[in-house]
Amino acid sequence: MEKYNNINDTNNSNCENEMNEMKESDGENEMNESDDVNEMNESNNENEMNESDDVNEMNESNNVNEMNEMNESDDVNEMKESDGENEMNEMNESDDVNEMNEKNNIINLVNLMKTNNIGIVKKIWQTWKTSKLPEVARLPFISWGMNNNWERNLKNDDEINEFIYSNFPMLYDLYKNVPFGVMKADIWRYCVIYKHGGLYTDLDTTCIYKIEHWIPKDAQFVVSGEITTQYFCQWTFYAAPNCYILKRIIELLLIRLKNIKFFKEMVHYYTGPTFFTLGIIIAIKELLIMEGYLELSQRINSKILRNIPYMPNNNILKQFLLKHNIHILPINVFNNKYVRHHFAGSQWNYKGYVPWKLNKNNILEKIGANNISLNI
C-alpha cells in the first residue's frame, strides 16, 4: 500500500436538529407528483417527530444513540429559513450588481454544469490530524482499499492547512479562526472536492460495496440523506471538479464564518450537516431559477429533495436534477447499505481517539456557552 499522510480531527459531522429554518411549508403540499411529498406538511412539529420515530426502526443501535443525543438538544430550533434566504441574497448581490452581467454569469454556469461531464473522478479523500492512524480507525480505512483502481488521499493537519492557503486564500483567515479542528476538516472537504473532484468520506466510515456500484458514471454531485434527521450526509459525498453546488457552498462559508458565535450546535450550523444541507438547497434553487422554474424553486426544501429517490421518474424536479447529473440517493445508502458510518464523534472513545463532540462540549462548558441557544 502506498504511503499516506494523515489529518485533522475526525470529520464526522453528526446530524443535529438545528436547521428547522430550512422547512419551507408554503410549497410542500403543492408537490402532487409524489405521495411522499404530498404528506410533507411542516405546520405540525409532532408529525416531524413521528417521522423520525418511524425511521429510527431502520437504524442500528449506534444510529439510535446518535438520534437520542440530537433530540436532547433544542438549542437551534428557532433558526429561520429567512437566514438561509438572506445569505443567498447576499451571495447573489456580491456576484454581480449589473443585471446583464448576472445573466451572462448564469448562462456560463449552466453551460459549465452541462459540459463538465468528465466521467467519474476516481479519487478518495480522507483526513486525520497526524501521520499515525488511531487503531480503531484502521479497519474502516483499510475497507476502502477494495476500490483498487481509485487513488487514495489521506491528508494531515499541515497538508490541509497548506492546501487552503495555496488554493483558497480568500478563505484562509476564516479557516484559521474556526475554534475546532472538525470545522477545519469540514471546510477542507468542500474545497478539496471542488478543486480536484472525487469522493470524500470520513475516517470512521466503512466501505461495504465498491464505489462504482453506487456512483453513476455521469455524476456531477452525489449525496444521500441521513436517516434520523432532515439533513444530507456530509460524512460521505461525491462531486466532480468545479461542481456548482460546492462552489456555492464555499461562497456561503465566506458569509457564514464572518461572525462566529459559540453555542452547543455551532459545529453543525457553521460548517457541518446543517450548513451543507442549506448550501445544497440554495444551489438547487438557483439552478431552477436559472432555467425559468421560479415557482418550483420556491417549493424546495430538504424534505422534498430527500424524497427525490422515491418520486416517479416523470417527476419534473427529479428529471431536472438528473439532467444536471445531480443524484440524490435513498437515505439508507450511506447508512449501512453501501457505506457504514460509525459515528466516532460520539462513540469512538478509545485510546488514541477523542470524540470531537466530547472535546467540543468540554470547551463550551468552560466558556459557559454549552447551553446557549442562538436565535438566528
Image (tube, helix red, strand yellow):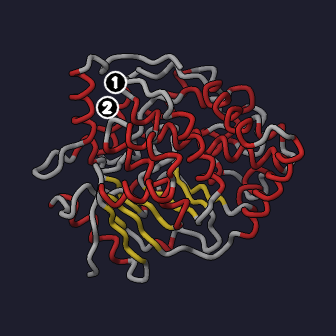
What type is the residue that disc 2 sits on?
Glu
The spot of residue 85 in percent (x, y) is 67, 30
Q: Are marks 1 and 2 in contact (CB under 8 Å)?
A: yes
In terms of secondary structure, where does tag 2 sit? helix
The spot of residue 55 in percent (x, y) is 46, 40
Residue 69's mark?
2
Q: Residue at x 60, y 60 (%)?
A: 221
Q: Residue at x 61, y 74 (%)?
A: 217
What type is the residue that disc 1 sits on?
Glu
In terms of secondary structure, where does tag 1 sit? loop
Q: Is residue 306 visible?
A: no
Which of 154 and 27 lies nearest the eye of the viewer? 154
In the image, residue 83 sits, relative to residue 201, either above or below, namely above
Which of 117 and 68 lies nearest the eye of the viewer? 117
Quarter containing the N terminus: bottom left
Relative horizontal placement of residue 217, taking residue 205 as reference (left or right): right
Q: Label 1, on which residue?
A: 72
Q: Residue at x 42, y 64 (%)?
A: 338
Q: Is residue 78 visible?
A: yes
Which of 212 and 362 lies nearest the eye of the viewer? 362
